[in-house]
Image (cartoon, grey):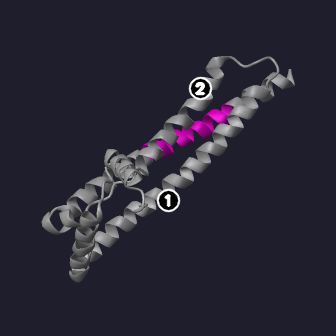
């Protein structure tokens, strides 16, 4: 934070509060102390680390799937827009919708959600909450993956239709 401009500090803190990230120095010091306390208990720290590594894997996979979706959507758009007769809107909708839905699901998976360290120490079921979060995000990722496959199938159909139209 810019400590020389109190107005900018208030604006930034207000914005962070709207996003669920409001942290002043008092909160940050308490968070640091709680993390140190958590690290002292090796068993809890191992569970915490394992579950966050699982969530990181989901984030990485979702990011890769978002890149795949972007590529497929770009190719579909180029192919459909290059047809001289002008494809019907139903083609475009049929082709793009699965990729858009897949991308939306990936964005749900990669949504940042921080667990305050104080709640990890004072709340004994943090591992259950992280397991629940992992399960929910895994489900969203699998839905995204299925829609990405549908998008790939739509691309194959569009290529077949365009090739068939040009071969006449």
Please state, as top left, top right, bottom left or bottom right, where the C terminus lies in the image. top right
- Residue at numbered disc 1: 60
Magenta stretch: helix, strand or loop mostly: helix
Q: Nearer the viewer, residue 75 or 36?
A: 36
For the point 70% across and 32% down, the residue is: 77
Instruction: Say which label, 2 or 1, has the lower sequence index.
Output: 1
Does residue 68 lie above or below 99 as drawn?
Answer: below
Q: Secondary structure at mark 1?
A: helix
Residue 160 appears anywhere in the view: no
Asked which secondary structure carries label 2, the reply is helix
Magenta span: 142-157
Dot 2 and dot 1 residues touching (CB under 8 Å): no
Residue identified by numbered label 2:
94
Q: Is residue 85 left or right of residue 59?
A: right
Question: Which is more toward the observer, 113 or 18?
Answer: 18
- Taking the spot 44% from the left edge, 62% from the top edge, the residue there is 57
154 within the magenta span: yes
From the viewer's side, name the closer residue of 10 and 56: 10
Q: Marks 2 and 1: which is nearer the front?
A: 1
Instruction: Residue at 65% x, 22% y: name it.
Output: 91
Does 54 lie within the magenta span? Answer: no
> Image quarter for residue 46?
bottom left
Q: Quadrant of the N terminus?
A: bottom left
Q: Determine whether, in the image, residue 86 is placed left or right of residue 129.
A: right
**Image location (x, y in percent) of residue 6:** 37, 55
Q: Is residue 22 above or below residue 168?
A: below
In this rendering, position of residue 110 left or right of residue 25 = right
Q: Is residue 20 left or right of residue 103?
A: left
**Structural crowding at the residue carrying mark 1, measured as other residues with C-alpha within 10 Å and reported as few (<14), some (14–19) or many (≥20):** some
Q: Position of residue 3 (x, y in %)?
A: 40, 62
Residue 82 shows in the view: yes
């Amino acid at each position: 934070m810019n400590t020389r401009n109190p107005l900018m500090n208030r604006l930034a803190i207000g914005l962070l509060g709207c996003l669920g990230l409001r942290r002043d120095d008092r909160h940050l010091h308490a968070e640091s102390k709680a993390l140190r306390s958590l690290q002292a208990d090796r068993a809890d720290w191992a569970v915490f680390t394992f579950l966050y590594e699982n969530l990181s894997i989901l984030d990485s996979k979702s990011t890769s799937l978002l890149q795949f979706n972007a590529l497929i959507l770009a190719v579909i758009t180029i192919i459909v827009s290059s047809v001289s007769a002008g494809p019907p809107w139903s083609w475009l909708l049929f082709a793009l919708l699965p990729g858009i839905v897949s991308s939306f699901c990936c964005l749900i998976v990669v949504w940042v959600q921080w667990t305050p360290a104080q709640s990890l120490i004072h709340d004994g079921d943090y591992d259950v909450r992280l397991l629940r979060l992992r399960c929910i995000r895994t489900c969203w990722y699998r839905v995204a993956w299925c829609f990405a496959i549908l998008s790939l199938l739509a691309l194959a159909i569009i290529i077949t239709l365009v090739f068939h139209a040009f071969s006449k």
